[in-house]
Amino acid sequence: MSDIGVNILLGANIFFFLYFLYVNGAYIVLMLFSFIQTKKAKKESEIFQLSGLYDTGLYKSISILAPAYNEEASIIESTRALLNLEFSDYEVIVINDGSKDSTLEKLIGHFGLKKIDRYVPHNLEAKDVRAVYGSRRYPSLFVVDKVNGGKADALNAGINVSRKDLICAVDSDTLLEPTVLKQMLMAFVSNPDTVAVGGVVRVANGCTFENGGVKSVRVPDSVIGRIQAVEYLRAFLFGRTGWDYFDSLLIISGAFGVFDRKAVVKVGGYLHDTVGEDMELVVRLHRHYREKGEPYRVRFLPKPVCWTEVPENWTTLGKQRNRWHRGLADTLWRHRKMMFNKKYGRLGFLAMPFFLFVELLSPVIELVGYVVVTVSLILGVINIQFAALFIAAAVLLGMILSVLSVMLEELTFRRYDRLKDVMILILYAFLENLGYRQIHAWWRLRGLFDYLRGNKEWGEMVRTGAFSK
């Protein structure tokens, strides 16, 4: 090989080494700030409870929106759980988005629903509503049957039907803990300018549930479930909490978030032509209020928890992560104007670049980096010591990051009360970096290519009915 070729390969190896060092180092720093923010949030929550504001009746009302498409396996249990929340003024609106299974029939039969005459304004664009159902036995429950239009369309229809001050968007396969609305309310009461709040999403697989609540918290039985349990701890509890510390949160999970209804209507609701409608709405809210120069807050609270069923097969998981990455790419492209724009403050100079160079482009750089380092080692361009340093930066720091996520969870909320479960999570925190991480990078890389090709398919989630076990 010529000297030029050797220098190019050597330079590429140094770049990849520094990139991995930066990425994993940035995540570890973000996690440390997350720990600080988590401790602060716990103290605020305790003060909020002691102040008695939960019992004053002065806080805002909430409409819970649960889009459902082919959710017959879990729809009854998840809806029952929503009806058992501890809150004085809320309504549950389940939106049947043209399901092809028995989702609607199960809801009608179990809750004794009848068609009702309820005015539905067209504040937001949505497919036609066929009927709205209500029940005398459950006066706070409403079921909307509509033409299929996708999740964003279903949420817009639910917003049109809603009558409360706030909207709580949840997936129909999720289960909210009974006190979760009270906990989320803290952000809106402490700061009236708050327009959106996200909470923690945890893995329900392996846990047992009873009467709409969590009976015991256990790790999933499967390898794929345990890996995702570690992922969710890292992403929600100590990733998004860190961004909340910097007041730069860009993502509120579509599985669980509370929004000011008027604010959502003001910016046009959820977009229909994206698979990342949850992130896109949050970024659009940021952009709207920054451009208008109006005060606002977007928060993340590490204590409120909802439980969700995660994929139990590799094909479904791969499609989910592909979709998530397409949604990320679409959101960053739509709002590229914010990138490095001083008008948007930390969002433009910290959050948006981080999500572009670290989250969006990392699968490209990671997979190419593995190939380049391997080829360079074979050709003798780098020695075994440099290759070991590369592995340490790319894999070992990732292991440390995952293990820290589990350990910090034990230092804060300790939802896994068995030592066996904690040890299993620590083990999988190591194992996920050896094979799964590389497969995950491949799924995300395909997601980026699919986005560039214009693929906007949602794909179906296979449910096993975790909440009914």
Image: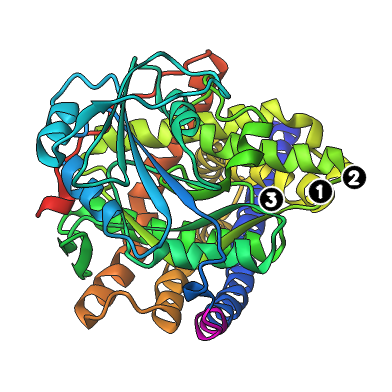
Residue depicted at 83% across the width and 45% down the height:
344
Label 3: few (<14), some (14–19) or many (≥20) C-alpha neighbours in 10 Å: some
Local secondary structure at mark 3: helix
Image check: 360 left or right of 404?
right
Residue 267 rendering spot, x and y as whole percentages: 68, 31
Q: Indicate which disc, 1 or 2, sits on the residue closer to the N terminus.
A: 2
Q: Are marks 1 and 2 in contact (CB under 8 Å)?
A: yes
Local secondary structure at mark 2: helix
Residue topped by disc 3: 14
- State whether residue 288 is above or below residue 59: above
Q: Magenta span covers which residues?
A: 46-52
Image check: 430 left or right of 290?
left
Per the image, is 47 magenta?
Answer: yes
The residue at the far right in this view is 342
Q: Which mark is residue 342?
A: 2
What secondary structure do most residues of the magenta stretch adopt? helix
Between residue 460 and residue 185, name the one nearer to us. 185
Task: Give, as a three-letter code, the residue at label 2.
Answer: Lys
Residue 131 rendering spot, x and y as whole percentages: 30, 20
Image check: 7 left or right of 316?
right
Residue topped by disc 1: 349
Q: Locate the C terminus by quadrant.
A: bottom left
Q: Locate the N terminus by quadrant.
A: top right
Residue 104 rendering spot, x and y as whole percentages: 19, 28
Q: State how far apart marks 1 and 2 are (Cα).
A: 7 Å
Q: Quadrant of residue 410?
A: bottom left
